[in-house]
Image: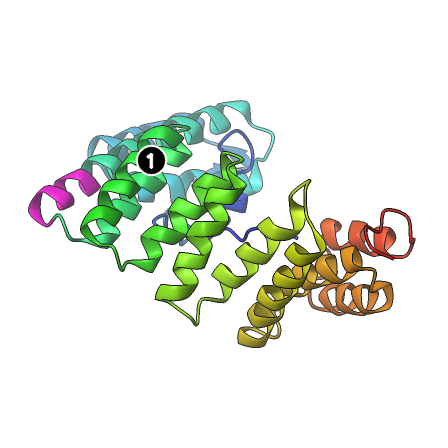
């Protein structure tokens, strides 16, 4: 059970934060390559090409090139260092471009998400929130901005604030399955979760699943709520269904083990 990220850059899970922000494009693996002889990577050639691309501010192409090399040389520490450096340059450029877009058009929602997303990946959640709040003040009906505010509130362990924001997203965009799922998650995971909270969480979680019935994350959230309510059989059925869709998800496997025991139920 979790608040769903917008994009998972699994390829960057080495030393770069593996967070999900929608402004980052999934590497496309273009026809960029560095010659290898007998399986040995020409590091000097690669470094020269990456440096050249970065100087041209073609950071996405440099990232694609490095990721393609890391696919074959996962343990190369120099490649990791080059990837981290290039990713930092990419994020700095995203902030700059987004800020320039805001100067041109202060109502451009995508520019605020671009800047805030980059700042969050850089570890500056305070500035990211500041950018989003500025964006919301000018675009009060932009559900996309509200959603990102809610996720940052949750990340900062401000659950009540996050819940209010997710409910606002639901008001603005009733078809947002993520908003329903996120609201259910926040309600169910709080330490002071009451029976009324769980009833409300069940409504939200079921709505998320109705909107996207084959989403295993939503099945997991709904299963968690049912488990906490004491509906063990239903929780087990849902998590098994989620595992059929995503059989390799370790979290779902852990949930299955947990739901198989009655220990930890809040309400009997």
Q: Quadrant of residue 90?
A: top left
**Is residue 230 or residue 173 the one in the foreground?**
230
Location of residue 198 in the rendering, given as x and y in whole percent from the top left corner = 68, 58
Location of residue 134 in the rendering, given as x and y in whole percent from the top left corner = 23, 41
Classify 233 as above or below 85.
below
Give the total of numbered labels: 1
Label 1: which secondary element: helix
**Colour mapping used in the image:** rainbow
Q: Quadrant of the C terminus?
A: bottom right
Classify 244 as above or below 88.
below
What segment carries the magenta color? Answer: 97-105
**Is residue 188 or residue 127 the one in the foreground?**
188
Location of residue 262 in the rendering, given as x and y in whole percent from the top left corner = 91, 54
Image point 49% across, 32% down: which residue? Answer: 16
Location of residue 246 in the rendering, given as x and y in whole percent from the top left corner = 69, 62
Q: Is residue 132 left or right of residue 15?
A: left
Q: Is residue 184 left or right of residue 52?
A: right
Write down the residue under mark 1.
128
Q: Magenta: predominant secondary structure element?
A: helix
Q: Is residue 47 left or right of residue 263?
A: left
Image point 44% across, 66% down: which residue? Answer: 176
16 part of magenta stretch: no
Direction left: furthest residue: 104
Q: Is residue 124 visible?
A: yes
């Amino acid at each position: 059970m979790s608040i769903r990220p917008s994009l998972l850059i699994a390829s960057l899970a080495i030393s770069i934060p593996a967070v999900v922000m929608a402004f980052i494009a999934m590497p496309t693996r273009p026809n960029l390559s560095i010659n290898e002889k007998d399986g040995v990577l020409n590091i000097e050639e690669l470094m020269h090409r990456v440096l050249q691309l970065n100087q041209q501010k073609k950071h996405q192409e440099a990232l694609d090139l490095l990721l393609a090399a890391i696919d074959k040389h996962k343990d190369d520490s120099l490649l990791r260092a080059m990837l981290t450096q290039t990713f930092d340059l990419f994020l700095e450029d995203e902030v700059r471009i987004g800020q320039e877009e805001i100067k041109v058009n202060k109502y451009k929602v995508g520019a605020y998400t671009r800047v805030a997303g980059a700042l969050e990946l850089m570890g500056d959640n305070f500035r990211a929130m500041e950018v989003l709040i500025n964006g919301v003040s000018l675009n009060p009906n932009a559900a996309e901005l509200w959603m990102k505010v809610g996720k940052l509130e949750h990340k900062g362990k401000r659950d009540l604030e996050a819940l209010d924001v997710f409910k606002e997203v639901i008001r603005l965009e009733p078809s947002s399955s993520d908003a329903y799922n996120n609201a259910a998650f926040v309600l169910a995971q709080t330490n002071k979760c009451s029976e009324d909270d769980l009833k409300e969480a069940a409504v939200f979680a079921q709505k998320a699943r109705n909107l996207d019935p084959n989403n295993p994350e939503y099945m997991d959230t709904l299963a968690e709520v049912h488990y906490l309510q004491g509906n063990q059989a239903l929780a087990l059925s849902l998590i098994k269904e989620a595992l059929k869709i995503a059989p390799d998800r370790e979290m779902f496997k852990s949930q299955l083990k947990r739901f198989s025991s009655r220990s930890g139920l809040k309400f009997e």
